[in-house]
Amino acid sequence: MPEFSPWHDNSPTYSPPNNGPAPSQRISEDPEFHSLRRAQRRFGIRATLLSVGGYLLYVLLSHSVPGLMNQRLLGHLTLGLTLGLGQFVVMGVTAWCYVRHMRARVDPLARGLGSRLHQHEAASLRASAPPAEAGQSVRPGAKEYRTW
Amino acid sequence: MVTLSEGIVDRFSLQLTLVLFLSVVVVTLFMALLTAPQRDEISEFYLGNRTMSPLRNGLAMCGDYLSAATLLGSTGLVALTGYDGLLYLGGTVVAWMMVLLLIAEPLRRAGRFTLGDTLALRLTRLQRPARLALAVCTLAIATLYLVAQLVGSMALLTQFTGEPSASTRTLCVIVIGTVVIVYAAIGGMPGATVIQIIKAVMLVAGVTVTAVMVLHRYDWNPGALLTAAADHSGTGTRFLEPGLRYGASTTSKVDFFSLQLAIVLGLAALPHVLMRLLAPRKIDVLRSSVVWAVGLVGLVCLGAGILGLGATAVVGRGTIASTDPKGDAAVLLLANALGGGILTALLSCLAFVTLLAVAAGLTLAAASSLAHDLYGEVIRKGRASETEELTVARLSAAVIGVLAMMLALVSWGANTATLAFLAFAIAASAILPTIVYTLFWRRFTGEGALLSLWGGLVCSVLLVLFSPVVSGAPGSFYPDADFAWFPLQNPGIVSIPAGFFLGWLGTVLSERQDAREDAAYEEFEVRMLVGAKE
């Protein structure tokens, strides 16, 4: 795990407004941040495609191939009705997987990065900047950083 | 007292309904006043109590999400059209998955009070025009949906009194509208939350108990329920097969798919639902709340399906269709057959409270968008004080309420489902593309946001204007005129891709991003994934 060592060297030597945005700049280049983004996005998009796309496909199939959907399985229970009930199951399973995935893969990364971000903010605040300005001086700082 | 000409319920349950409804209104009004924001703080007015437990939050979300249309309308559709009606309920459930999987957590992390705030964090240019466009879209959606709720309340009254006279209708709309305004303007989000939770508890309990009674009647054998429903539907096994409502032609099949698209993508982008997502302070509370809501929404929709099938099985499709051709009476007829006057009164009271709660949530969402985005940021350019903004929010809640009351009285007899479906279509084609691009597309620019918001709104409204909904068909607003060149009743299948395409087009055509925009997005992304310090 790469530490944010350059930070502590740099921060005292520059004026406070330049320090404000820098942690996010650094964090967005961190490999951990990339894996956090990947983990959250990939699962979200796949699961949405699976549940929402699957449902829309089911609606399309219901009206385009009624013969298949009307196959009796048990009494009056047709394949279409079974798939409809299956949607509820798919939904429950997806929600469960989502919670498990977020807990195992996403939350620890987000917590780690978040605490580093806040630690650094607190440090730079203590160093010099007045608290009220900490949240605002964002864009000029970002520009400054780019010109380094 | 109104005359009881052709109502489906007797005098006893009418009185009981009135008593129940009034007591719920009085209790919730008191609670709304007690919990109303005490200080002039906009965060309390917009977001309410931010430390509620996940279950309560989940109940409130479920309350915002499920309208009377689900309880009465979808159940009636199941009773009348069987399989096709069940697909509506499925769409309602699946739409909530969009919220859980894609929208809830990123939006909460990157959001403040309204969607406009999230957009403003992200865009470096054109923030104010984008807020203006968002406020207009929010207002359009909220007004349409609000009018649908108020017209629905009049339609519900019809079940009791037969065709209500003009003065009865006015009285009904004014009473409901005034209560809604009081909840929203005085109670703010805390007040709206109280009634959402009470409504959600009533809804879950009412639907579950009635569904259990239906299943009990058929000895807990779903097969027997299906057989009885098919037997009493007058259409035999076709009742349990797709196509009873939308199977006539290719056009109607495409129309149905278009509607499903609007439901699945639009319900998740309704402004009052989005606003509710911003309330919990902690991300893990938000996640548990949304998961609770998954369960509750699933339970209610499953129960509503059983109620619809039960209504056909117990009452018979002929009676339901002759009482109300749209099927809204199905639940009340079923309740009357199963539990007599008392159950009917309970469920009618539930329907009225559901109307009230959703209307309050909508009024609040529209009012906060007007006050925060339009007044605070566009008109006063961010210089308005909190007290000032709060006054504007309360005033706009009253104005929106009155506007919706007048529109509802004018459009009495309009098909509530059509109004609601148009609202979903606008949400799916204007707001959803903007949310998705804002959260997930690095290059998205202000031009893209403007084009997708205005384009999605105009596209869906125009398509409906030139569709059989407005002219050229027996059931349309102007049956005599015919300028309907768009064959579908639901614009979603065209307007949703159009909204996404316009957002892409606007972004691609705008100037290349400079370093400032990259930095703004990077900061936004960190905030969206890691979270900001509270």
Image: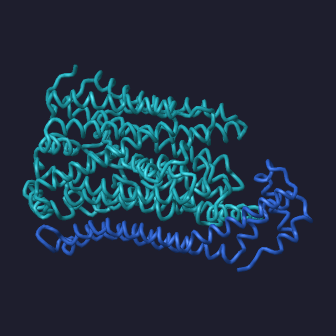
Image location of residue B182, percent across then percent down: 46, 29
In the image, residue A46 sits, relative to residue B310, either above or below, namely below
Q: Residue at x 16, y 74 (%)?
A: A71
Image location of residue B482, percent across then percent down: 32, 44
Residue B259 visible from this viewpoint: no
Taking the image as shown, residue B249 lies to the left or right of residue B362, namely left
Asked where in the image residue A117 lies, by quadrant, the reply is bottom right
Q: Residue at x 45, y 47 (%)?
A: B461
* Quadrant for the N terminus of chain B in the image: top left
Image location of residue B516, percent across then percent down: 77, 61
In the image shown, does A85 or B217 lie closer to the viewer?
A: B217
Chain letter, blue in picture? A
Residue B500 visible from this viewpoint: yes
Taking the image as shown, residue B471 lies to the left or right of residue B158, namely right
Image location of residue B94, percent across then percent down: 37, 62
Q: Residue furthest top?
A: B1
Q: Residue furthest bottom?
A: A1
In the image, residue A70 sits, relative to residue B500, either above or below, namely below
Labels in figure, total: 0
In the image, residue B413 sits, relative to residue A10, either above or below, namely above
Chain letter, cyan in picture? B
Instruction: Indicate how the structure is coloured in the image.
Output: by chain
Taking the image as shown, residue B519 lies to the left or right of residue B393, namely right
